Image (tube, rainbow, N blue to C red):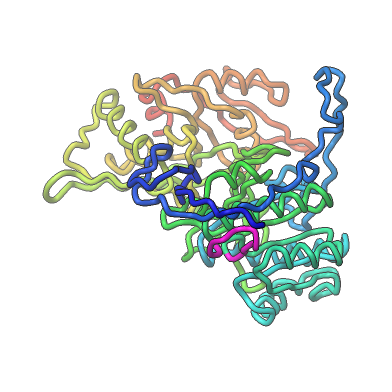
Amino acid sequence: MAKKQKTVYMCSECGNEYLSWQGQCSYCGSWNTIVEHKISGLKEPSADTRRRTGTEGRPVRLGSVGTSDYARMSSGIGELDRVLGGGIVLGSLVLISGEPGIGKSTMIAQAANRIAENYGTVMYVSGEESEEQVKLRADRVCASGRGGGISDALYIYPETNIENILSVCEEMKPCFLIIDSIQTMYSNEADSVAGSVTQIRACSNLLISFAKTNNVPVFIVAHVTKSGELAGPKTIEHMVDCVLSFSGERDRDLRILRSFKNRFGTTDEIGAFRMSSEGMVEVSDLSGSLIESDVCEEGSVISAVYEGSRPVFFEIQALVTPANVGFARRTAVGINYNRINMILAVLEKKAGINLLNHDVYVNVVGGMSTGSTATDLAAALAIYSSYTGKTSSRRIVAVGEVGLTGHLRSVPNADRIVQEAVRLGYEAIILPERNARHAAESGNVSIEDGGRSVRIIPSGSAGSQSISVIGASNILDAIRSWT
């Protein structure tokens, strides 16, 4: 006899459950997100489907546990492998999200074809598009493969029932599984419509059980909300092994892939792509592609941040104009709005620049978005340049965090940013005083001219290149060195 169904009320934002309906979720604070769900009294999945620890359920000394590298497969896309920490870990679940039309399915189709060429059977499950639609995209993006087309080991399966999908996978034994998208899948075990919190939870549990039992990596495509957050219950982000986000401006061809969670690697890496008619093209030299002009312009300063294992250089532009009516406007694109307000206050207090009656616009050129404090100094110099009409006489880079006292605080990996600045041919770089001393003391440089200029010999190069490393203790020192 079937058990009676149970009715619960669940928040669609965070997945928290309640016994009765209420207007606001007490866990995440969202309003009007609690909806009714019916849960059938089916038997819970067996505990044998969960991951094993290798210790047969008995506690052991942590120091005696052996370590081993995770087995990985290459996706055939270097930037994707970089973000994942060196490749796709077998048996892992990777959740990838992004706005519609940003290029998620395009990149996954390329990766699926290359994995099929190198490793064997790949199953592409499409719940949103028909076979013909997926084939049209694959014909366009898979022409660069080893065989010059779509691999014979790549299979398409348009299905939304998760039990049918897993049944076919048990039969075909794929080495890689793609679910596009999780919001279109439904399970017979949950009595609700596809895309609901209950269905997404049930389908994710079944996919986790399949991946861990068969040691098959699974890519799950997910939608995002209007605010850019991952749609569905937040518990899914805790269930999967890796959460990737694909971002970029739809009117630009640059796409950035970031990792917000990774159990098998760092979350600091980023991958850069450009959307083209042949699909996603990797951008190996991201710094060179973001900076188009070598001319020093008014209100424009070059800055850099260290993302994962590589420094990224980009241009910060500022425009300061007199305010016509009302309150002065403050606009920031690609950089934190609150930090811009803080930098403006420091400039007024420490540099004597009165911006009360001026509109200030700050933009990170190229569609990049940075949350690093290392761009504070460049933003301050760009605002100063636009306000005074002055420009630097040299190709110069500015890196450093601006404190409320006006002093510059050190930033991590400044020595590697200096190395990249040399490669890109910059004449000078302004750093916080502590970072400048550390760069001069590192083993890769020899000090000249009283410690203000360092000569760097790149590895594998017979010649040498020089860059002037300028240490500034506060914002006024940086302004004087920049001009």
Q: In this view, does 314 lie to the left or right of 155?
A: left
Residue lying at 39% horizontally and 37% vertically, measured from the top left:
26
Indicate the quadrant containing the N terminus: top left, top right, bottom left or bottom right: bottom right
Q: In the picture, residue 29 is in which quadrant?
A: top left
Residue nearest the observer in this picture, 218 or 360: 218
Query: Where does residue 31 sit, x and y in percent of width and height?
Result: 34, 47
Q: Is residue 292 in view from this perspective?
A: no
Query: Where does residue 290 sit, x and y in percent of width and height?
Result: 54, 52
Residue nearest the observer in this picture, 199 or 121: 199
Is residue 308 magenta-colored? no
Query: Where does residue 46 sit, x and y in percent of width and height?
Result: 76, 45
Q: In this view, does 168 lie to the left or right of 248?
A: right
Indicate the quadrant containing the C terminus: top left, top right, bottom left or bottom right: top left
Magenta range? 184-194
Residue lying at 48% horizontally and 44% vertically, measured from the top left:
14
Q: Is residue 93 left or right of residue 248?
A: right
Is residue 185 magenta-colored? yes
Residue lying at 69% horizontally and 47% vertically, measured from the top left:
44
Residue nearest the observer in this picture, 372 or 443: 372
The furthest residue to the left: 325
Q: Is the magenta stretch mostly helix, strand or loop?
A: loop
Q: Is residue 355 in view from this perspective?
A: yes
Query: Where does residue 481 sit, x and y in percent of width and height?
Result: 43, 28
Residue lying at 53% horizontally and 39% vertically, measured from the top left:
304
